[in-house]
Amino acid sequence: MLEFLKKQGIDEKLLKEVEKFRQNNPSNLNDRIDEVEFFYYGKQVWQEAITAILAGENLLLSGAKATGKNVLASNLSKLFQRPSWNISFHVNTDYNSLIGSDTFNHGKIEFREGPIYKCAKYGGFGILDEINMAKNEAVAVLHATLDHRRIIDIPGYEKVKLDKNTRFIATMNYGYVGTRELNEALASRFMVIDMPNITTENLKKLILTKYPTIKDKYLKAFVDIFESLQKKSENSEISTKSVDLRGLVGAISMMKLGLNPYDALKLSMINKCFDEFEKTIVIDTVKTKMPTLITESVFDE
């Protein structure tokens, strides 16, 4: 990770501070440290995120779909060598699922620790996915945890003080179905990074990192397809369903196994549109960049 960030041009002083953090705060839960499948590309965002974490702040990563919010959150866990817990917010997320609850074990009542509690106890990074889908009960749990008090008060048990290394990294897609406005009190507990769309150059780097033998003309075609769909989504011509970076990478994986490129894109992007009019637009967009039948390999042998 450090070598990757040096190549990205990240400030050397920041990287030295990260190394100090890692040396002074070893983790005994290495199996909980995320493994990196993809790197996040974006110098400015990296510098902002690292600075906030080193300053003891929590992060809110806000932005459109396919801007790399979860990739960055996972990368930060690996960079700082901290155990991480992923918490997805939905209508059934409540106090017990976040903090923990009483459970009957071997003839006695014990406290079953929830992910927020474990983050506090072990100095972990809590990834709060889609935080703007959280209902009021779940949000109330976070207030004292995320502000200067840094405590979790558990009725009937002890008051838990957060480990000095504990950080929370929240993500949110503004405007998704089921989401709502993030209340001011909760938003004030985060440093907010507005995640930009991935650039053409960085998208190429991301694909080449995983598939270094892909032919240039197909790399360009896949990038063009993704960016064309992204622009149509931004112009409200289509929804964001087909603007799926995970889907694009998954399609290339299937091509590696011999699936025809157009068919792979159909499975991973086109068929995610269930409205026929929208699907027609996506099909036309893909066909202008990619023939429906390709006999040669997408990769250099």
Image (spheres, rainbow, N blue to C red):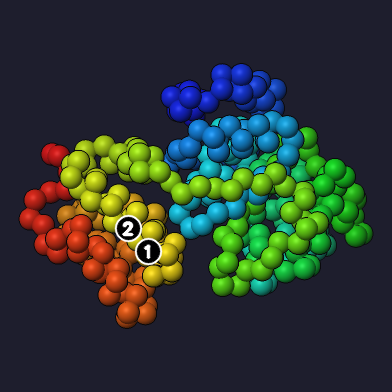
The x and y percentages for residue 8 are 46, 28
Q: Is residue 194 above or below residue 16?
A: below
The residue nearer to you, when weighing 9 against 264, is 9
Q: Would you name the residue on which mark 1 appears?
A: 232
The residue depicted at 45 percent of the width and 54 percent of the height is: 66
The location of residue 55, given as percent across then percent down, is: 73, 32
Determine which quarter of the picture holds residue 92: bottom right
Above-or-below relation of 126 to 45: below
Q: Is residue 43 visible?
A: yes
Q: Amino acid at mark 2?
A: Ser
Residue 23 seen in this snapshot:
no
In the image, 298 versus 189, the foreground residue is 189
Identify the residue position indicated by label 2 in the image. 228
Label pair 1/2, CB-CB below 8 angstroms: yes
Quarter of the picture holding the C terminus? top left
Furthest residue in direction bottom, as rendered: 276
Q: CA distance from mark 1 to mark 2?
A: 6 Å
Give percent across and percent down for residue 293. 11, 62
Where disc 1 sits, the SS reads helix
Residue situated furthest front in the rendering: 235
Q: Would you call the spot at circle 2 few (<14 residues within 10 Å), some (14-19), or many (20 or more)?
A: some
